[in-house]
Amino acid sequence: MTILGIDFGTSNTAAGVMRDGKPHLITVEPGRTTLPTSVFFDYDRKETTYGSVANAALIDGREGRFMRALKSVLGTPLMREKRQIAYERLTLIEVVARFLAMIRTRAEAETGTPITQALSGRPVQFHSTDMARNAQAEVDLRDAYLLAGFADVSFMYEPEAAAIASGPLDKGKLGLVIDIGGGTSDFSVFARDGDVTRIIASHGVRVGGTDFDRAISIDRVMPLLGRGAEVRNALGDGRHTAPNAIFNDLATWAKIPFVYTAENRRMAADFAKLGVDPAPFARLNTVLEMELGHDIAFAVEDGKIAINASSVTETAIDLGVIAPALTATLTEDALLRILADHARQIAECATQTLAMADVTAEQIGKIVFVGGSSLLQVVAGTMQAMFPHAQQEQAEAFTAVADGLAIAAARDLP
């Protein structure tokens, strides 16, 4: 019997099994052991594609519905609402189930064995301020696994899985996993007893890479579409500021597919006529009419990655898809300001994790960075300031959790 370890992430997904005593990652795309957690429903071909193929369909401008960051919606009423998605009516649980079924099928093809059990990673807190939603999120994810053809699924905190896969610790020292993913930031304090990893405490907060993207987009991009701009009243004198809701949704990965409503299109058209400065609202109108929300989100993500490169202090977010030569400037200083509150929340969660473990920062001998967003300088710098004497280990950002899940899953085998 094979238990498949699956790290179903907000932005990327990986899966693994044990082979010859070592974690073996499944080739989930040709030549790759990770794939974007993306889904594209193709209107013309009436087919569903996943991962890089789904991303390419969006970039190529194919007619259809693109979805990403579905993990962020787990636990909310949106998951169980039946809605028209391209050419069929589905719930988002069914969409997640199809993605997981695809992973299962590819794992079965590579291992040559049927797979009916999974050990799934999960954040410590799907929703750190709403415990009812946090509990419901695991229910939703479990239902998606069962619908995907798994007979059984169990869950492990993602930072705990990463701790299992991490290297040795110095004698008398503890380790701290810092897992900054697409949707959450998670921490685990751990010890080593020989080859056995002992988890002392784990904690998490709902802040991650997609939140960084959202904050950057709201601050740098959305003003170019009319956020904060004034609109003349349709009747009589006076002005009012354009409502923020549409801009906030356009900046949020999980909400972009639901922005293109007739009501929003009418509102944008009215703003383009009544705006004190009509140009930004004309761009908003273009974004809604051409459904460019995800193109903007990818451009923002590219800008975030570019400004994080060594020695880069300024970059341009390319918005040429909206209007020729349109860009939004992103500087290193602006990024630090935009993400300051997120960095504070992450630091507070790390401090709370130490308190739960009843240890001090000086007892941490090694910090293990996991997750794509842990590579951001604003995150790494904040953590390094908190643990100046700790050895720093950069784990495989996108696969460390899957490695640990594969190891843990094999231990559960009879």
Image: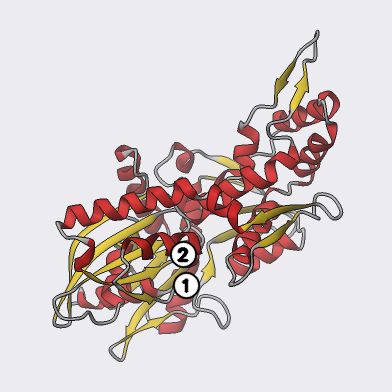
Looking at the picture, does residue 106 appear above or below residue 207? below
Q: Are marks 1 and 2 in contact (CB under 8 Å)?
A: yes
**Crowd band around label 2 with a 10 angstrom C-alpha radius: few (<14), some (14–19), many (20+):** some
Q: CA distance from mark 1 to mark 2?
A: 6 Å
Disc 1 target residue: 105
Locate residue 319, reporting x and y percent: 76, 54
Residue 75 found in image quarter: top left
Residue 407 found in image quarter: bottom left
Counting every numbered tag in the picture gives 2
Q: Residue at x 66, y 48 (%)?
A: 86
Looking at the picture, does residue 246 appear above or below residue 319? above
Q: Is residue 235 in sight in this rendering?
A: yes
Q: Residue at x 23, y 62 (%)?
A: 361
Residue 60 found in image quarter: bottom right
Q: Residue at x 31, y 51 (%)?
A: 349
Residue sticking out furthest to the top: 236
Q: Is residue 3 in sight in this rendering?
A: no
Disc 2 target residue: 101
